[in-house]
């Protein structure tokens, strides 16, 4: 069986069946959460750089000659719009970092969930991006993957999947085949 998509050991599976998330799995989930926060912070610096650059460029164009300076200062609202736009982007960026931190906290204290039932495999093709999402329905629970899972899950067989959920993210921790189709 091709398990490269899922990295769990027999010990992970044994403890997951007892309702316990292993320390190795907890570390992996916490690392995923911290990675999300790092990416969000990096994106915040990029967004801030673009906003400040755009604001300076716009202000520079307004100050480039006497007519545009007069037009800029003729309406007092113009004095609030440019700084207001910068503050709005900073607030949105700060909120995105805050929510990424909350997601990371949820991943650092995961709750083990279980889905079991017969497997039904499907694909969802996005017409816009041309990407394919591979779906595995385990009982009533739907799992989405970026890689094909038909070599991992056998259509019609019964499986039990141990996973955790944090916001919209779901991570399969381990699984076991319960019966053949």
Image (tube, rainbow, N blue to C red):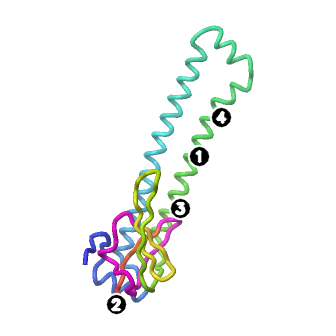
Residue 90 lies, in percent from the top left, at 57, 41
Closer mark to the observer between disc 4 and disc 2:
2
Residue 150 lies, in percent from the top left, at 33, 74
Earlier residue among tags 4 and 1: 4
Q: Which residues are magenta?
A: 145-169
- Residue drawn at 45 percent across, 39 percent down: 46
Q: Quadrant of residue 131?
A: bottom left
85 versus 171 height, above or below:
above
Q: Are marks 3 and 2 in contact (CB under 8 Å)?
A: no
Badge number at residue 180: 2
Query: Could you tell me how far apart the alpha carbons at marks 1 and 2 are, in whole angstroms?
Result: 50 Å
Residue 171 lies, in percent from the top left, at 42, 70
Q: Which residue is mark 4?
A: 84
Q: Which residue is mark 1?
A: 92
Earlier residue among tags 1 and 3: 1
In depth, the one of 68 and 98 nearer the eye is: 68
Q: Is residue 29 left or right of residue 62?
A: left
């Amino acid at each position: 069986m091709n398990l490269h998509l899922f990295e769990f050991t027999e010990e992970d599976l044994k403890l997951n069946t007892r309702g316990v998330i292993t320390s190795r799995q907890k570390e992996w989930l916490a690392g995923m959460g911290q990675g999300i926060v790092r990416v969000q912070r990096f994106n915040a610096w990029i967004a801030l750089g673009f906003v400040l650059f755009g604001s300076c460029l716009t202000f520079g164009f307004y100050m480039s000659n006497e007519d545009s300076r007069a037009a800029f200062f003729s309406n007092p609202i113009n004095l609030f719009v440019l700084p207001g736009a910068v503050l709005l982007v900073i607030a949105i960026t700060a909120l995105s970092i805050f929510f990424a931190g909350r997601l990371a906290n949820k991943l650092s204290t995961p709750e083990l969930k279980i889905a079991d039932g017969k497997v039904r495999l499907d694909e969802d093709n996005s017409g816009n991006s041309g990407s394919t999402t591979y779906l595995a329905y385990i009982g009533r629970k739907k799992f989405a993957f970026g890689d094909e899972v038909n070599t991992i899950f056998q259509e019609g067989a019964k499986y039990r999947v141990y996973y955790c959920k944090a916001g919209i993210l779901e991570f399969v921790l381990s699984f076991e085949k319960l019966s053949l189709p």
